[in-house]
Amino acid sequence: MDMNIETPEDQNEENSRRVQVRFKTKLKPPQKVPSNSIAIPSNLTRFGLSSVVNNLLQAVNPEWKSEPFDFLINGELVRMSLEQFLLAKGISAEKVLEIEYIKAVAPQKEEEPSLHDDWVSAVDGSNPGFILTGCYDNLGRVWKAGGVCTHILEGHCGAVSSVNIIKSDGLKYVTVATASKDQTLRLWKVCSGSWDCTISLWRTNDSDAAGNQVSIKKRKGNNQVEEPQLEGEAISTLVGHTQCVSSVVWPQQETIYSASWDHSVRTWDVEMGKDLSDIFCGKALNCIDIGGEGSALIAAGGSDPILRIWDPRKPGTSAPVFQFSSHNSWISACKWHNKSWFHLISASYDGKVMLWDLRTAWPLSVIDSHKDKVLCADWWRGDSVISGGVDSKLCVSSGVSIQ
Amino acid sequence: MRERKKSSAVEVSSVKKKKEKKTKDNNEPREQKEKEESQSIMKQQKNTTSRSKKEKQRKTTEDYESLRESELSGDEVHGTDRDVDNADDHHEEDQTDGSEGHRGVEESDSSEDEVAPRNTIGDVPLEWYKDEKHIGYDISGKKITKKERQDKLASFLANVDDSKSWRKIYDEYNDEEVELTKEEIRLVQRLLKGKAPHTDFDQYADYVDWFKYDDALHPLSNAPEPKRRFIPSKWESKKVVQYVRAIRKGLIKFDEPKEEEPKFYLLWGDDSSAAEKAKHLAYIPAPKPKLPGHEESYNPSLEYIPTQEELNSYQLMYEEDRPKFIPRRFTSLRSVPAYENAVKDSFERCMDLYLCPRVRKKRVNIDPETLKPKLPSRKDLKPYPVACYLEYKGHKGAVVSISTEASGQWFASGSTDGTVRIWEVESGRCLRVLEIGEAIQYVAWNPLPELPVLAVSVGQDVLILNTGLGNEEEQRRVKDLLHVETPTAPDDNMASIVSWLQHDKLDGIRLRHFKMVSSVEWHRRGDYLSTVMPAGESRAIFMHQLSKKLSHRIPFKLHGLPVSSVFHPTRSIFFVSTKKNIRVYDLLKQRLIKKLETGLKEVSSIAIHPAGDNLIVGSREGKLCWFDMDLSSKPYRVLKCHPKDITNVAFHRSYPLFASCSDDCTAYVFHGMVYSDLNQNPLIVPLEILRGHTSSNGRGVMDCKFHPRQPWLFTAGADSVIRLYCH
């Protein structure tokens, strides 16, 4: 049974070509359309397709509120008119085309920015309960969702350069680590890269000797009484980079990934303290993150406007598998979504945070809330993008629906 | 019979014959024998005995005619009384003799008295006629009947009686008896002796050289051309076949046939090129007069006729520039007047033809493109700074000087607003602002990474300041180093010129000079620094030792106003640039090594390559000189690129890059590769023009410095912005 759906564009272009399509989805029933094939005009873009799906949903459920959708054909997001897309990809329009739709990934609303006293240099949103930020005023801050600063972490005598939430023991105890430009790791971090071209591994957990569980200056979430500080020695130092190590990640227990200004991304074996592999890119790198498919893709941004993604599993090549180049200036931060294989954000000195999907070369959305350089960005609660920048604001863009 | 045979068998051996001849008159058998011998020889030499034969022939023909008649009358006349056995014997004998006789016929070559034999059977064995009554046929086809055989005894008796019988020979072929004449006998005898048959023939006559070759005009031989000259040679045809095969196999290759240019005489062409071809001496023909065109026609088209305005304009021209001929229209050729300049023109032409001196100009035919140096593509020379991604804003006045920290994490800038700012490269954050209160001239960061100390020249002071960076231990060391006791003034003379004071407000050292200090330069070890005071005359350049808090005047005489000084990156060599020249001093031996002549009007800045053998010099007229110290004291290259003053030049520490910045608000980046191979000259390639700064008070970019580790360039502008250009 065929149905013809009249859409506004359709009426304008009565004589345009039509394509037989069938919509399918992995979404739950209220968002599911009947799996009949329908004929739609081929000049529809994403917006047109979205309104078709919304119309279909409304036909089933009159109380349906329309919602933006994104569309995948053969695993690729549609970013032009359907006709152009089919031509570009060489897909036959004769057969019934299967279009998968997903919820459009775009921030729904901007929350009130949280104002700091100085540049926001680091942000961590791995705990759904709060956001941790580091600031150039030597303080770390803990924010509740609505722009309310609950705690201020004092202790550094230099600007905080990196923050990390190590572990949350239930609700009450949270371990956080901060690194500072005063050359100290004030609350312990797992591993740290530095301007002396080395990566140091720290372990100061004297109570838990077994430990791969790293960390360790405990701080109760409720009070700000500091326990006596421990002066720790680095348990091992990874030497190999020739210039400053700008970013490190430790996604698995045995490997550390690091990016450096000597234009390389290196993989380290923690136990051996050895360099497993390196990828050279030709530009000084500022940030690195591991994620994506099988948590194996390396995303890195550097001193040029291109966000590069490597697949280290691919043998014999060090060419990036993806390059996203919509930014205008250095990329200061990049983060993979921790659930999705496809989504990542990048922050740049041009004041923009971009949301990327690996399935298309265009950014899904551009968050333009900052007025100056964005220094850090992270995901929060799986559906919000948090970012901090030179304009001393922590911006939260929520409502990013990623299944 | 047997005897005859035997004798005939041995007749060839001449010795025997001679013996026999000597004894031939003595006895009968000898005579007989001799007769037989002579008979056989006679058969061989039959033709020589032609005369006797003729006679005999005559006789025999008569006989035969009579015989023929008898034959015609009755066939079986002879056959009845003939002895069969005898006939058989005779026939046998005939055969052998006949074969011999036949040979003799063949060998005959004297044809003058040849008489055809009576018998005409030809060269067939006589045996065939053995059983016949005839022995053959005569010339008219009649059968020649055999003679009747004589009884042997009767013939013997007849021979005995006949004294001439020894000279008679039986001719078997013709079936007749021949009597040899005396001459014939003599002839035979001569032959037997091995002499020539005729007596008048001298076998060994003296050689007479009939032909004289000395003055012979005509060919020796008048012989006709031999036939072989007219028939194709077999050898040649074989050779031809050989060649054909070789050509087919490709063993013989032919040259490409030359394309002959058609030889035309270029009627209207210039003769000069033709003269070159003909290899005369330097004869240059006069150029041909211009051929008449349409305008010289008596009735040219209207467009050739000048208008009145044009004619008037001709009048305004100089005489030489005026056109020689002004076209006019006539209705017919008859109405064309005489050409008034005809004599004059032809006279001038004649003058031109033989009086005008002509010189052939040598013109070098070179494509100007090939004269351009071959430069490598810019793509291959990456990385180099291309685009500006970061701006460092905060200064209120023009940024005069910048200096990067050794690790490349921070840099310092000094401005006319009286502040020194320390920036973080990565984020563009200003870490610290040092309020000096006076316009900054120069900032220089200590080259040691563990000694974060900044030298700032302000007016007559040089301040050595603590940046406050680095860890606590380093800070402690720096504070110790920057502490000065109250001046003890060990040398009054020196103290009046330079004094070491403690700067209280900014926690540093204040080096008070007696004149304006224009630039400060650190030694690579970070302990010494040199200061330049352009107005200081003989005491213009000082060396200060930070650890001992001592100052020295350099022991060299300067010729001219010093502009800038720089330490050699590896050796104890010191470069001082005055307005025109650069002097190179050895600090250990304390003497002048070299003087580099820039040829510039006013040097503004110098920079030295990290290997230390190359130097770049920027000048106020916008020229950049590259000196190769190994080559000469003259610049290796002079690059004229900036339209305005070059304010500063810089080398990169590790990449083969150098840059110059100018008041025209641009900075140029060059590739400057210095090879370790001494035979290879440095390669200089212009790479990029970096724009972005705006002009302020006529000043553009005031300073440029490379990042120590990345191929990035910092530029300080008079518009109070510092820009970072990245690759």
Image (tube, coloured by chain):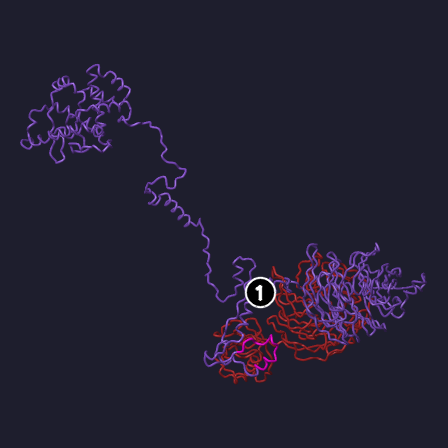
Chain colours: A red, B purple
Residue at the far top: name it.
Answer: B26
Above or below, comparing residue B49 to residue A306 in the picture: above
Residue B400 versus residue B621: which sits nearer the camera? B621
Please indicate, yes or no, whether residue A129 appears anywhere in the rendered image: no
Q: In this rendering, does residue B513 appear at all? A: yes
Which one is in front, A9 or B345?
Answer: B345
Image height check: is B102 above or below A36? above
Q: Secondary structure at mark 1?
A: loop
Which amino acid type is marked by label 1? Leu
Q: Residue furthest left?
A: B73
Q: Give me the residue at 60% from left, 83% from top.
A: A65
Question: Would you say residue B213 sits in the magenta stretch?
Answer: no
**Residue occupying image coordinates x 12% and y 24%:** B87
Q: Is residue B666 above or below residue B71?
A: below
Disc 1 target residue: B355
Horizontal side, residue B37 vs residue A288: left or right: left
User: Subunit of mark 1?
Assistant: B
Q: Which residues are magenta?
A: B310-326
Query: Viewed as shown, does residue B630 lie left or right of B498?
Result: left
Q: Is residue A70 left or right of residue B201?
A: right
Q: Is residue B284 left or right of residue B72?
A: right
Coordinates of residue A199 in the picture (x, y in percent): 74, 61
